[in-house]
Amino acid sequence: MLVGGEQYEPDRLADELWRQRPTHADLDELAALQGRVAGCERRYGLPSAQIHDAIAQGLLEETAEVCTWIIEYELLARTTAVPTR
């Protein structure tokens, strides 16, 4: 709806939210990311939120796989708005 030649704010917000909705590909990638992070948690027997502490305490070595886990966990946390620490 136009009000004074401009789009009414709720309509503009609704249009913007519609444009930003996730696609099936986005949801598939999110599910894959969640699966990879969960796989690392199972493999190492450690919740992702404890990765940095485990490295600092010498309980977990900072290998390429662990670094990938950290990156993917932090990406997942930003994507789903879950704090990483």
Image (cartoon, rainbow, N blue to C red):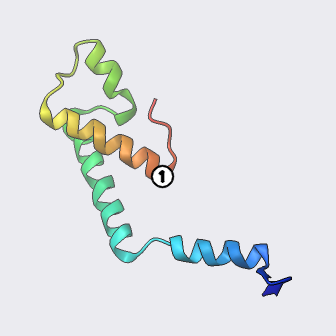
Q: Is residue 22 left or right of residue 65?
A: right
Quarter-of-image position of residue 47:
top left
- Circle 1 crowding by C-alpha within 10 Å: few under 14, some 14–19, many from 20: few
- Quick one: SS at disc 1? helix
34 on left or right of 85: left
Amino acid type assigned to the residue bearing label 1 in the image: Thr
Q: Position of residue 22 (x, y in %)?
A: 45, 71
Compared across the picture, whether 26 is left or right of 67 comes to right
Q: Is residue 28 above or below residue 70?
A: below
Q: Nearer the viewer, residue 29 or 38?
A: 29
Q: Residue at x 31, y 64 (%)?
A: 29
Q: Left or right: 68 with respect to 64?
A: right
Given residues 3 and 10, the one toward you in this image is 3
Q: Quarter holding the N terminus?
A: bottom right
Q: Looking at this rendering, what residue extends furthest in the front direction?
A: 5
Image coordinates for residue 62, horizontal then vertical, percent: 18, 25
| Residue at the farthest left position | 64
Please give the residue where the numbered disc 1 appears in the rendered image: 80
Q: Nearer the viewer, residue 17 or 33?
A: 17
43, 77: nearer the viewer: 77
* 72 up-or-down from 3: above or below: above
Residue 61: x and y in percent read 16, 22
Q: Residue furthest top?
A: 57
Residue at x 15%, y 37% (from the top left corner) = 65
Which residue is located at x 28 percent, y 60 percent?
32
